[in-house]
Image (cartoon, rainbow, N blue to C red):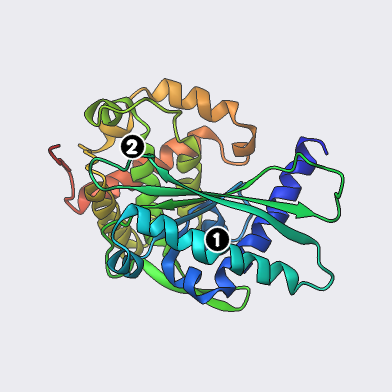
């Protein structure tokens, strides 16, 4: 299996795992789905995504407030949900090997922002001799402050599922980009990480679908951006904050072949338009002391 075949396989396996999670009511009610996979469903298109992104639902946190309890919930409920789903397939293609649930960070987060990393290994009867199939990864982020329009029901595989609205995804994508910049990493005394240039690409996709003249949409997105920043103590003075190390961001964007259908110049102009729009709503500066 070459690299392209592996990507196709991961996409197929992710779809099956997502369907299994959504069919299991306990799992479905414990999560709010988001990220590139949900963005693709909002907009159409097929931006590559090699994992499943989600947030813990507030209802689960209310019942299981401790990180070890949340970890135990998924360790108890996810394996049988996957096993039942795979066994009901006709013909049976996948079978479950293992589910591993890890806390991120392992000892808990000092501010309570504990996430979970779920790694699922499955057998594929189309490749019975292949012992190197990659694990399916599910990111489960800590709950965040959400506005009234942040979550909506979306039919996925015919089942009404809670997902982030397009406005919330827009706000979170911008916040996520800021968390990868050096100023935020210094503030939180955290290690640096690669520029999240795919978030710039995704914002450009959203602007193509929702014109900046759609004031209602972008007003809600601005509010969700503010709430997202508040949830993770992300400061923002406006466009200058986004422009940190912009030359390096350009270099990383141009090096990513999966982003070729949106020029960096369009991504840059999109960012400027959206941040200028947010400025008109008076949300800057955003400052959250540690």
Q: Which class describes the residues within 10 Å of circle 1: few (<14), some (14-19), or many (20+)?
A: some
Between 218 and 134, the one nearer to me in the picture: 134
Between 16 and 101, the one nearer to me in the picture: 101
Between 154 and 72, the one nearer to me in the picture: 72
Query: From this viewpoint, which residue is outermost toward the left?
Result: 289
Name the residue carrying label 1: 43
Q: Residue at x 52, y 60 (%)?
A: 38
Looking at the rendering, in which quadrant would you find the N terminus? top right
User: Is residue 211 at least partly visible in the picture?
Assistant: no
Name the residue carrying label 2: 178
Q: Can you give x and y, in whole percent of width and height, for residue 71 in the image?
A: 42, 55
Between 33 and 91, the one nearer to me in the picture: 91
Q: Residue at x 22, y 29 (%)?
A: 187
Q: Can you give x and y, in whole percent of width and height, for residue 175 in the image?
A: 33, 44
User: Is residue 56 at least partly visible in the picture?
Assistant: yes
- Considering the numbered disc 1 on the image, is that residue within a helix, a strand or a loop? helix
Q: How many numbered marks does the figure carry?
A: 2
Q: Separation of disc 2 and disc 1 at Cα? A: 23 Å
Q: Residue at x 15, y 40 (%)?
A: 287
- Considering the numbered disc 2 on the image, is that residue within a helix, a strand or a loop? helix
Return the mark for residue 288: none
Q: Can you give x and y, in whole percent of width and height, for residue 123 in the image?
A: 76, 53
Q: Which class describes the residues within 10 Å of circle 2: few (<14), some (14-19), or many (20+)?
A: many
Q: Can you give x and y, in whole percent of width and height, for residue 262 in the image?
A: 57, 40
Q: Of callouts 2 and 1, which one flags the residue occurring earlier in the amino acid sequence?
A: 1
Q: Is residue 155 left or right of residue 275?
A: right
Looking at the rendering, in which quadrant would you find the C terminus? top left
Please tell me whether residue 12 is drawn above or below residue 108 in the rendered image.
Answer: below
Please tell me whether residue 227 is drawn above or below residue 149 in the rendered image.
Answer: above
Q: Is residue 150 left or right of residue 163?
A: left
Q: Quadrant of residue 146?
A: bottom left
């Amino acid at each position: 299996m070459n690299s392209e075949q592996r990507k196709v396989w991961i996409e197929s396996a992710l779809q099956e795992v997502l369907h299994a999670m959504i069919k299991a009511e306990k799992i479905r009610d414990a999560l709010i789905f988001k990220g590139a996979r949900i963005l693709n469903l909002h907009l159409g298109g097929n931006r590559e995504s090699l994992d499943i992104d989600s947030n813990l639902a507030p209802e689960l946190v209310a019942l299981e407030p401790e990180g070890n309890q949340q970890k135990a919930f998924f360790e108890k409920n996810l394996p049988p949900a996957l096993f039942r789903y795979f066994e009901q397939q006709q013909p049976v293609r996948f079978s479950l090997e293992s589910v591993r649930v890890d806390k991120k960070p392992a000892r808990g987060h000092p501010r309570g922002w504990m996430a979970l990393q779920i790694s699922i290994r499955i057998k594929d009867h189309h490749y019975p001799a292949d012992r190197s199939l990659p694990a399916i990864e599910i990111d489960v982020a800590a709950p965040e402050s959400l506005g009234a329009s942040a979550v909506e029901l979306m039919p996925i595989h015919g089942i009404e599922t809670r997902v982030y609205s397009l406005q919330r995804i827009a706000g979170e994508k911008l916040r996520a980009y800021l968390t990868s910049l050096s100023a935020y990493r210094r503030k939180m005394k955290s290690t640096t990480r690669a520029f999240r240039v795919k978030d710039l690409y995704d914002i450009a996709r959203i602007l193509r679908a929702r014109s900046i003249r759609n004031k209602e949409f972008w007003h809600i997105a601005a509010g969700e951006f503010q709430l997202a920043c508040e949830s993770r103590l992300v400061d923002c003075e406006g466009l200058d904050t986004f422009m940190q190390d912009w030359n390096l961001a350009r270099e990383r964007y141009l090096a990513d072949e999966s982003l070729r259908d949106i020029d960096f110049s369009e991504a840059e102009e999109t960012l400027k338009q959206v941040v200028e729009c947010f400025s008109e709503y008076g949300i800057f500066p955003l400052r959250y002391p540690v």
